[in-house]
Amino acid sequence: MERASQDLMHEHDAILFSLKVLEEICNRVESRKDVLIKDIASLIEFLKLFADKCHHGKEEGFLFPALIEAGIPAEKGPIDVMLAEHTMGRNYIRQIQESATDKAFRTEEFGKSARGYISLMRAHIQKENNVLFPMGDAKLSDSKQRELIESFEKYEEEVIGKGKHEELHKQLEAFNTKFLKSSVQTF
C-alpha cells in the first residue's frame, strides 16, 4: 500500500538536493568566486514554490489535519514543532532573498541566513522522516492514505499547475549541472 508519507519523503530527497546546491553557492560566495544573483534568485524561487508552496502546502493543508483527526496532538507535539519550523524556514528564505538582490549583495547576511536555512531544513526533514511520518503511518488507515494521495495530486494540479512538478525537477537537474556536477539524480 502506497502511503502519503512516501510522496512527501520523495519530495524531501529533492529538497535535500536543493540544499546541497545552496550550500555550494554559499561555499562559492565565501571563497569569493563569482555567483550570479539570477542563480540565487532561481534557487530561492524553486524553494518557495517546491519546498514551501507545494510540499509544506500538502503537509499543512492535508497531512497535519489528518494526523490531528487520527489523534496526534495539534499542540505541544511534533505537528506544532513542524509548523513552527515551516515559519522559521519562510523567514530564512525572506532574509536570503533580501540579502541577494541586483541592487546589493550582502554576502555575510546571505551566508548566515542560507546556512541557517540549510541546517533547519536538514534537521526538520530528519524529524519528519524518522518521527512524524512513522507515527502518522501507524495511525492512518489505508483508505485515509489513498484519500491523502488523491488530495496531494489534486492540490499539485490546482495550486502548482499541471506539469509544474516535473518542470521543477528539471530545474534541479540544471542546478546539478551548473553547481554540483554529481552523478545523475533521480527525483
Image (tube, rainbow, N blue to C red):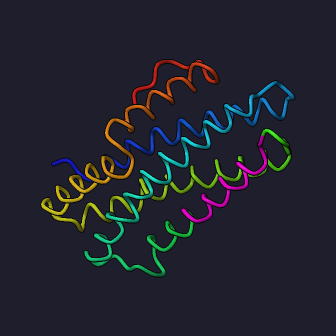
- Judged left or right of residue 111, residue 119 is left
Query: Looking at the picture, how far across and down is residue 180, in whole percent?
Result: 61, 23
Query: Looking at the picture, how far across and down is residue 97, in whole percent?
Result: 70, 48
Dominant secondary structure of the magenta stretch? helix
Residue in the image at 38% along x and 80% along y: 73
In front here: 34 or 70? 34
Residue 133 counted in the magenta span: no
In the image, residue 25 above or below residue 108: above
In the image, residue 178 above or below residue 6: above
Q: Identify the image quadrant of the C terminus.
A: top left
Residue in the image at 55% along x and 49% along y: 48
In front here: 58 or 9? 58
- Judged left or right of residue 180, residue 54 is left
Dividing the picture into quadrants, the one containing residue 92 is bottom right
Magenta segment boundaries in residue numbering? 86-101
- Judged left or right of residue 79, residue 87 is right
Residue in the image at 20% along x and 53% along y: 150
In the image, residue 185 above or below residue 137: above
In front here: 71 or 169? 169
